[in-house]
Image (cartoon, grey):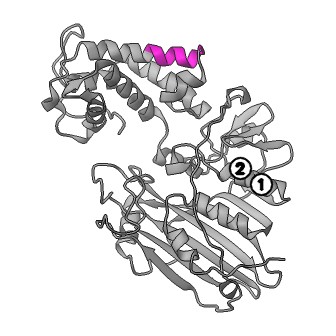
Amino acid sequence: MALQLYTGDLPKLYNIAMTMSLAELHYELANAKEIRLLTSEVSGELHNRSVAAIHARAMFPGTAVVQGYDELMDAVRQRVDTTDLSTKDSIADGDEFFGMRIALFSATTNDSVHPERFALMLTIFLLGEQQPGIDEYVDTLHDTTLMDKLSLAYDKEYLVKIEKDMEIRDRAVIVGDTMLYPHQFVRRFYSASFVNLPPLLRRCLDQGLSVKLRLDPLRSSKPDYYRDWIEADYWHGRHFSAELLGDKDKRSLWTLHGTTDFMPSDEKPLSPGYPVSFTGFRSKMMDADLREFMVEEFTPTVNPLLPSWRIEGVGKKYTLQKFAHLVYDQKCRVFNHLDGAVRVFRNDEYAETFSKLPNDPGEKIGVRHKLFLVEGNIGMDMVQDLLYEFFMYNPHIEEYFAPLATAVTLA
């Protein structure tokens, strides 16, 4: 929904003191030097502090970042005041005007546009446009600049082991006098806030488990800027069954759960915000006493409920897929490995993969990048909590595990 640079025919030159059309306003906001400089400065600092523009004033009152935000808001408002807000036909078509159309819709009540609200929404979209998206984060998955600068050791999968001198807070990782963050792809919708995964990883540490985490390479700030707030989601889950855990079948067992796209009466219709069409579950023996489980989430390439809204996890070049891998030691009767990852596809590759469903598209698809890893004697409650948290908004996780209701006692 961000405002995009207008690439069509340039509008005629005009004096900003005169009345602009909405299309001319769009061009002015995308190209005015004052707007670009303010947007870049404020957006970068908000990104480092991991705070949405709409919450900045409440969280950091009286600070430089809020002063910059207010300056940007004033600059946008001045331009809105010289715009004929009734010229909706000028932005009726074209993807580049989508954000402005949404801002206009949000600011309209009883066919009357509220200029202050319109300016606020435009400011938020401008700031959001400047922040790194999916494609930028895919391109920096192997970027070690920040870790090298802080002399943090990382393994071949770019995971940092959380040591005793590091602190996992609910929304950040504190390393000395630097505030870092779990990777962007661990966030809700790959871009919003964290929910319960960091606290769960902290519980893993408290239980003596080894925790490794992929860090966000594009954000760092000071611990003084840490802010906490509550956002939670609740799932009802069931445990694995002892029968499945003890299965010695070496074949790869493939189970697919799907959701009907257009049936509102369905007990579990697609979520309009994050539609998950299919989830694949694999299980097989990987060694004499080790049984592995894999979970693969498939969202559609186009939102079937809201076609004009992009699917979270789909960028201009890349598509993300959530993936989890678990290992159960049948001899010791304990899970000893659980990692959450994303698979990265080029958009055309993912579209081809998705088109094969409900047939099995195969295991070797996409490029896998681990986001977190837990090792040690992992209890069933922790396995369940981590999976439901990582696959938030995916109803198939509960569907798959619910029939396996036999309680499992681990050593």
Callout 2 amino acid: Pro
Q: Is residue 2 left or right of residue 8?
A: right
Q: Identify the amino acid type marked 1.
A: Arg
Residue that badge 1 annotates:
203
Q: Which residue is mark 2?
A: 199
**Magenta segment boundaries in residue numbering:** 62-71
Helix, strand or loop status at disc 2 = helix
Placement of 135 over or under 403, stated as above or below: above
The answer to whether 271 is drawn above or below residue 129 in the figure is: below
Residue 45, image x, y percentages: 57, 26
Q: Is residue 70 magenta?
A: yes
What is the number of callouts on the image? 2
Instruction: Confirm whether the magenta stretch covers residue 218.
Output: no
Residue 129 lies, in percent from the top left, at 41, 34
Q: Magenta span: helix, strand or loop, mainly?
A: helix
Above or below: residue 407 compared with residue 67: below
Residue at position x 46%, y 61% in the image: 345
Q: Position of residue 71 (x, y in %)?
A: 45, 13
Residue 328 shown left or right of residue 54 in the figure: right
